[in-house]
Each structure stands twice: as structure tokens, then as C-alpha cells.
Amino acid sequence: MAKTDGPTNDPPASLSHIGSDGRARMVNVADKAVTQREAVAEAWVNVGPEIAERLRQTGAVAKGNVLETARLAGIMAAKKTAELIPMCHPLALDVADVTAELVDDRVRLVSRIVCQGKTGVEMEAMTAASVAALTVYDMVKSAGKGVEIGPVRLLEKQGGKSGHWTRQEGGDGAR
């Protein structure tokens, strides 16, 4: 059975990246089993009707193909996550995939990351989706300053001790 993100009566989980002395620390994964880890995350970018129409017609702005550039930026970012987030372990990724699609007046970016490892790939998936969204913003900002990013969120993760978790709310990016 999938875990959900709804409220529970469980006691709050401890923060694994905070030591007993209150200092930030990298979690020790030395004794953890290597398992297949997978995570899927999404980011939405509200580009507005004018920019969306331009993307529908040409797919590009002055800087180039927006969706393809964002997709590649997300893949590159996933591979650099440990350099960007201080307590992330460097991971050898088996799959780093990002899709980009126009949905009405918004761009939906979905990242899927897979590896065989001792720790999860949620941060790699979230980083990929976030950087892809920032790339969309960068590429279209000259056409309109009202572009908005969000939400950015984890949709699913599997592997490791905590098992399989899936977000239970709709996938339309509504907040």
C-alpha cells in the first residue's frame, strides 16, 4: 500500500540531517542496503496566454527552443545536485529524464530519476524539475515579467526502507 501525504497521528519524524548537537550533517548511509531508488517530481510555470500562444506556434523565443532547453537543463541539474545541496550524497544516476509540455497557459515539467544506491533520489528529481522551471523563466522573461513558478513538488518515490510513496492529490498543479 502506498503511503500518502495526508495528516497522520504518527509522532513527527526526526530531521535526519540535524545532529544531536543541532548542527547540520550528512547522513551516514554506510550500512544501508543498495536498492533501486526512483523519484518523480514536477514543476509548473505559469507563462500566461501570450507566451503560451507563442510557444504553441513556434516553440521558441529569441533565446531558442524553450521546452527542449528546459528539459536539457533539468537533466544536467539532476547530475549536479550534490554540488548544489550541501548534505546530498553524490549519486551515480542510471536515468535522468525530464519532460516538458504546454498545458493551457502553463508549462509542466516532470523529472524522473533512477539509480541503484543507498539513498534516495528525491532531491535529484526536485532539483531537475526546479532548474527546468527556472530555465523556462529565464528564456521567456523578456516576453513578460509576470511569469510565475510553482508548485514544485515530489509526486512519487520508491526504494529504500520507507518504501513506496505517491502524492494523492490531482496532478494539475493546483495549489
Image: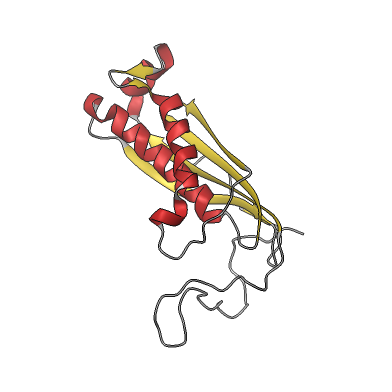
- Asked if residue 76 lies left or right of residue 164, the reply is left
**Quarter holding residue 9:** bottom right
Residue 107 on image: x %, y %: 44, 31
- Asked if residue 153 lies left or right of residue 170, the reply is left
**Quarter holding residue 136:** top left
Residue 8 on image: x %, y %: 62, 72
- Asked if residue 160 lies left or right of residue 92, the reply is right
Residue 2 higher or lower than 71, as above or below: below
- Asked if residue 31 lies left or right of residue 63, the reply is right
Which sits in the foreground, 42 or 81? 81
Residue 28 on image: x %, y %: 56, 74
**Res. 153 visible in picture:** no
Residue 149 higher or lower than 67, as above or below: below
For the point 32% across and 39% down, which residue is it? 148
Q: Residue furthest top?
A: 57
**Res. 115 visible in picture:** yes
Quadrant where the N terminus sits is bottom right
Which sits in the foreground, 174 or 109? 109
Residue 110 higher or lower than 80, as above or below: above
Residue 165 on image: x %, y %: 66, 57
Residue 80 higher or lower than 45, as above or below: below
